């Protein structure tokens, strides 16, 4: 019976290993290919072709001009500011700005598109042939960050559609045209990404870039930046295969999740003898699956035609002189601020930060601003400041489900708390507890909270010596083991000292005194 029992265990173990081996070898049979199309809403006061207000969150159908509603006889007038922001973004992404670009009509029939077509730039876009470099690093997924590049096929100006509102109780759909005609740039990337994590890192980098340029708010939760992902898988070395498009992904993590699920779905279909259909799918963020929407349209379905009411858009590529009708690209290029890639390099070179810290700080502009405020005085250790912000403050914010961009704590508040920690007036545990308290009591200062709670460290040597003696008297066995040569039990005694003092003494001083007493 024992032999039989062991053989069964061995069989189950081998079966488990075989399943894992098959899973890993199965994934190696396939290569996933991902390409993105990103729509970013431009930060302008008015829309792309009308004077209606370009805003988010207004009353339904309150920001709609006659042109936005496709009233016959109304004509488009191109917004100069939209062109400037489009060119600025293109230059920041190393694109070639085209001296002449044209507008087209892209026909499709939805209730939220009153004219029956969208004005875009399909054949002669504003810019083309760019590249974006970004860092891929997801704690828990990647051990170390790595650099990735994605080529940009083109950047085009286009108008947004309205928004359909579906009422399940009334069983009817309503239309809000506030977004109709809102200015967009569409950034079309080549299919040169491998998985969802790379796609999410690219989107995060693009959000940071457009925010620094002031071209777009980057608030994906408001629809200011929306992502379409084209996903396919193939055998290594084979040409590109049938792809599916995932529409309107509304968060950075959603991009990673949607693409990861779609890759797994396609692999399962193919390994079960099925075939991939060229279709459009949507991402269900709750169920964490992609679901079918419709068959994928092709270029012929849209019946592109030149926009007859807009002349070709011309820009000046060489001179810094511009006129009322022609923009100067060199002048716009001078407006480009420091970009995220440059900020990361400076953090690594000037502050000797690890690449992981540099990436995380740049990814959270509010924390980066606090870091810069705290390190402007050369007396503070940059690595320790980064540690407090990324390992402590960010942990507390995540625990409270507060986005780092909405952090209510000021640089002055964090500076005071950090200095108290460095001066050894509080412990690291107290620092963390104080951060939690500050989120509930924003009107209080760290010193006030620590004083009221009695959290300041005891540094009086006489008091610490008394506590050490009490721990020694209460633990004679550990003391004997230490004196017999088992010095490692000192850690156990120090742990008891922390507990006995309720974590309110300077442990560097406590360890020193404890060791001195034991050696007597």
Image (cartoon, rainbow, N blue to C red):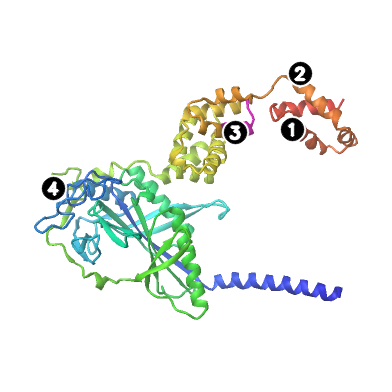
Instruction: Identify the residue under disc 3.
Output: 433
Q: Secondary structure at mark 2?
A: helix
Q: Secondary structure at mark 3?
A: helix
Q: Magenta span has 384?
A: no
Q: In the rendered structure, which segment of residues is drawn in magenta?
A: 424-434
Instruction: Identify the residue under disc 2.
Output: 462
> Foreground: 118 or 402?
402
Whether residues under marks 1 and 4 lie with C-beta atoms below 8 angstroms apart, the answer is no
Residue 276 spot, x, y in % from top left = 43, 75
Query: Of label 1 and label 4, which has the lower sequence position?
Result: 4
Q: Magenta span has 431?
A: yes
> Is 133 placed above or below 264 here?
above
Residue 366 seen by the camera: yes
The reply, left or right, for residue 2 in relation to residue 291 is right
The reply, left or right, for residue 171 in relation to residue 8 is left
Query: CA separation, marks 3 and 2?
Result: 27 Å
Q: Residue at x 13, y 47 (%)?
A: 325
Query: CA separation, marks 1 and 4?
Result: 75 Å
Whether residues under marks 1 and 3 lie with C-beta atoms below 8 angstroms apart, the answer is no
Q: Secondary structure at mark 4?
A: loop
Res. 453 image quadrant: top right
Check residue 499 in the rendering and tell me which mark sits there, or answer none. Answer: 1
The reply, left or right, for residue 100 in relation to residue 248 is left
The quadrant of the image that shows the N terminus is bottom right
Query: Of label 3 and label 2, which has the lower sequence position?
Result: 3
Instruction: Identify the residue under disc 4.
Output: 325
Query: CA separation, marks 1 and 2?
Result: 18 Å
> Foreground: 384 or 178?
178
Query: CA separation, marks 1 and 3?
Result: 17 Å
Residue 359 spot, x, y in % from top left = 49, 46
Query: Of label 1 and label 3, which has the lower sequence position?
Result: 3
Whether residues under marks 4 and 2 lie with C-beta atoms below 8 angstroms apart, the answer is no
């Amino acid at each position: 019976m024992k032999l039989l029992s062991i053989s069964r265990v061995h069989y189950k173990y081998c079966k488990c290993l075989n399943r894992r081996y098959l899973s890993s070898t199965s994934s190696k049979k396939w290569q996933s290919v991902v390409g993105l199309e990103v729509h970013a809403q431009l930060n302008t006061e008015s829309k792309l072709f009308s004077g209606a207000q370009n805003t988010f969150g207004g009353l339904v159908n309150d920001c709609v001009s006659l042109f936005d509603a496709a009233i016959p006889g109304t004509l488009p007038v191109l917004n100069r500011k939209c062109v400037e922001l489009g060119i600025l973004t293109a230059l920041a992404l190393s694109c070639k700005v085209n001296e002449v670009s044209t507008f087209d009509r892209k026909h499709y029939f939805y209730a939220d598109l009153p004219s029956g077509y969208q004005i875009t730039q399909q054949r002669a876009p504003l810019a083309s042939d760019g590249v974006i470099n970004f860092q891929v690093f997801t704690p828990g997924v990647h051990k170390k960050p790595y650099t990735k590049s994605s080529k940009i096929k083109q950047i085009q100006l286009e108008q947004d559609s309205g928004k359909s509102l579906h009422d399940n109780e009334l069983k009817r759909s309503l239309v809000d045209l506030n977004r109709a005609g809102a200015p967009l740039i569409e950034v079309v990337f080549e299919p040169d990404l491998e998985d969802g994590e790379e796609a999410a890192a690219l989107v995060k980098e693009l959000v940071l870039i457009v925010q620094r340029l002031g071209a777009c708010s980057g608030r994906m939760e408001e629809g200011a930046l929306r992502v379409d992902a084209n996903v396919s898988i193939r055998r290594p070395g084979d040409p590109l295969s049938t792809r599916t498009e995932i529409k309107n992904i509304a968060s950075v993590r959603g991009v990673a999740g949607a693409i990861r699920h779609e890759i797994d779905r396609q692999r399962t279909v193919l390994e079960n003898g099925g075939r991939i259909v060229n279709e459009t799918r949507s991402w269900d963020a709750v169920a964490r699956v992609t679901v079918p929407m419709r068959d994928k349209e092709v270029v012929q379905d849209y019946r592109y035609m030149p926009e007859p009411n807009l002349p070709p858009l011309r820009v000046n590529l060489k001179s810094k002189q511009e006129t009322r009708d022609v923009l100067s690209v060199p002048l716009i290029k001078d407006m480009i601020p420091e970009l995220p890639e440059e900020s990361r390099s400076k953090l690594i070179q000037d502050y000797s930060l690890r690449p992981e810290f540099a990436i995380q700080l740049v990814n959270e502009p509010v924390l980066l601003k606090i870091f810069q405020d705290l390190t402007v005085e050369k007396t503070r250790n940059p690595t320790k400041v980064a540690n407090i912000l990324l390992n402590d403050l960010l942990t507390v914010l995540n625990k409270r489900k507060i986005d780092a961009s909405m952090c209510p704590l000021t640089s002055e508040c964090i500076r005071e708390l950090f200095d108290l920690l460095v001066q050894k007036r509080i412990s690291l545990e107290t620092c963390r507890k104080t951060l939690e308290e500050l989120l509930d009591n924003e009107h209080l200062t760290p010193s006030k909270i620590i004083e009221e709670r009695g959290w300041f460290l005891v540094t009086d040597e006489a008091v610490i010596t008394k506590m050490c003696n009490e721990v020694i008297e209460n633990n004679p066995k550990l003391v004997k083991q230490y004196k017999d040569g088992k010095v490692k039990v000192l850690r156990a005694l120090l742990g008891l000292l922390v507990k006995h003092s309720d974590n309110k003494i300077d442990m560097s001083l406590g360890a020193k005194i404890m060791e001195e007493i034991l050696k007597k």
